[in-house]
Amino acid sequence: MTDLIATNRKTAILGMGATGLSAARFLSSQGKSFVFADSRREPPRLDEVRQQYPGVPVVLGPFAEDLLLDFTNVVVSPGISLDEPALVAAREKGVTLHGDVELFLEHADAPVIVITGSNGKSTVTQLVGEMAEASGLTVGVGGNLGTPMLDLLVAVSVPVSPPAKRSVTEAQSEKSCSTTCVVASTDSEDNGPISSIITYIM
């Protein structure tokens, strides 16, 4: 049992890298409280987290299996296996596990284009963004390509005013695409898990 479990906050962010910090910014913009957990004893951005979120509980080191059982939602950063025992236990108890892609799609209030494939995704992402701009639309480009996709929703890293009318983001998986997505592939044959690029059209 850890101190993290005793908190009254119901959302945990696993991982304190770029994705975890973007999730924190997004949740903060929504007025939601959260806690941080990272399996590393000294994650590189620990000082940044403590400076930006001094009142947020932080747990470091290997995840205890019961770490997340009292939470309602867990935001899982890329690179953390869903087979992690703490996540398996949480999922079995009914805790909702999110990636940043899921959060992005859940809160995107406009159509989304997902471009998938093995090669050329970043190039296509840039081209789609440039095409949108050439059409007179305001666009933000991010995801794995640069700006974390959740930052496109809170306009933290996208220097546009008014907020982005089009956001082009590169993601790790197409599995999160909802009915608001249009999917196009850069592969002649689309087989198995592949990376995705999401074009968020506001």
Image: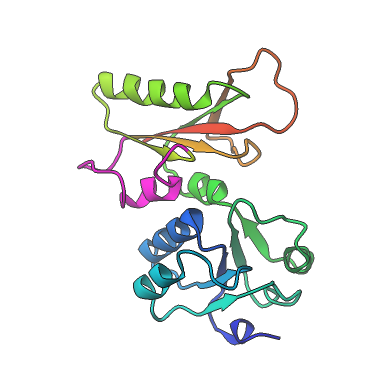
Q: Residue furthest top?
A: 188
Where's residue 121, x and y in %?
Answer: 52, 25
**Which one is in front, 18 or 128?**
18
**Relative height, residue 70 to residue 165 (above, below):** below
**Secondary structure predominantly adopted by residues drawn in magenta:** loop
> Residue at (76%, 74%) from the top-left corner?
65
Whether residue 87 appears in this view of the structure is: yes
Query: In the visual, does 157 lie left or right of 124?
Result: left
Percent across and percent down for residue 2 are: 66, 85
Is 153 a magenta residue?
Answer: yes
- Left or right of 20 on screen, residue 116: right
User: What range is drawn magenta here?
Assistant: 145-165
Q: Is residue 82 above or below residue 121?
A: below
Above or below: residue 134 compared with residue 107: above
Q: Quadrant of the N terminus?
A: bottom right
Q: Residue at x 57, y 32 (%)?
A: 196
